[in-house]
Image (spheres, coloured by chain):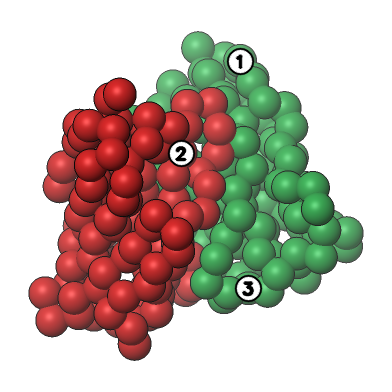
Chain colours: A green, B red
């Protein structure tokens, strides 16, 4: 079974721009979560989608948004980028929302200049 | 307010010896704990988990121990191998602001020398 895939793997943007990241979950998995990893804060939960609906949301500003499509693929959008948004953005999938184990993709490394 | 803490940023162990990685948590409502391993430029890989109703779970060279009264868990790797060198994250799931999202510690970098 193919794992979680994320595109693009690397991205460079400038302050004020917006960015869209994509995630394809493991086949049969309907829940997709997004996390931000930075050296200072570690891995922090952004939001989770299940059946095209946002189920949970972490403590991030409204500039961070997401959506999920009927095929369970998910996109994450960050508007008005700030330098502090430079991070590794990780997507994780599980069969159902609330299941214990999440499986992570390789991440998208975003650099904001 | 960190709910999951890994107080040792790094750990160095010789090949063949035991590696013990520690994790403390503050929220007694956490019902499931997981360990992930992460190599540079890759996403975290699931290693092993334990339910809050158990005190030990074993999978090959990896064993996780849970002490609920102390709100402490540990990951034992025996014997340690150079390929185990990576960052290890402890995570917890449970009743928290973000529902059933995982709450992660900041990680411990394990270095296994041959």
Circle 2: is it few (<14), some (14-19), or many (20+) Cα within 10 Å?
Answer: many
Q: Residue furthest bottom?
A: B53
The number of numbered badges drawn on the structure is 3
Q: Earlier in the sequence, mark 3 or mark 1?
A: 1
- Tell me, yes or no, whether dots 2 and 3 are on the same chain: no
Q: Secondary structure at mark 1?
A: strand
Q: Is residue A57 left or right of residue B114?
A: right
In the picture of the structure, the residue carrying the numbered disc 1 is: A12
Q: Chain of mark 1?
A: A
A10 lies above or below B84: above
Q: Secondary structure at mark 3?
A: loop
Q: Is residue A14 left or right of residue A69?
A: left
Q: CA distance from mark 3 to mark 1?
A: 32 Å
Residue occupying image coordinates x 81% and y 65% = A28
**Mark sitting on residue B38:** 2
- Tell me, yes or no, whether dots 3 and 1 are on the same chain: yes
Quarter location, residue A27: bottom right
Residue occupying image coordinates x 16% and y 42% = B8
């Amino acid at each position: 079974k193919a794992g979680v895939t994320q595109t693009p793997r690397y991205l460079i943007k400038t302050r004020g721009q917006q960015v869209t990241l994509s995630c394809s979950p493991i086949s049969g998995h309907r829940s997709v979560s997004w996390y931000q990893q930075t050296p200072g804060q570690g891995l922090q939960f952004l939001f989770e989608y299940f059946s095209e609906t946002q189920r949970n949301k972490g403590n991030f500003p409204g500039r961070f948004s997401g959506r999920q499509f009927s095929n369970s693929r998910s996109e994450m959008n960050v508007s008005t980028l700030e330098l502090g948004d430079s991070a590794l953005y990780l997507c994780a999938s599980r069969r159902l929302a609330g299941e214990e184990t999440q499986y992570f993709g390789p991440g998208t490394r975003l650099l904001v200049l | 307010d960190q709910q999951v803490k890994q107080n040792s940023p790094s750990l160095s162990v010789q090949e063949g010896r035991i590696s013990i990685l520690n994790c403390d948590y503050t929220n007694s409502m956490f019902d499931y704990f997981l360990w992930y391993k992460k190599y540079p430029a890759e996403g975290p890989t699931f290693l092993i988990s334990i339910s809050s109703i158990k005190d030990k779970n074993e999978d090959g060279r990896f064993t996780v121990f849970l002490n609920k009264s102390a709100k402490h868990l540990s990951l034992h790797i025996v014997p340690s191998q150079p390929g185990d060198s990576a960052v290890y994250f402890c995570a917890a799931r449970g009743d928290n602001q973000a529902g059933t999202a995982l709450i992660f510690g900041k990680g411990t970098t394990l270095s296994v020398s041959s």
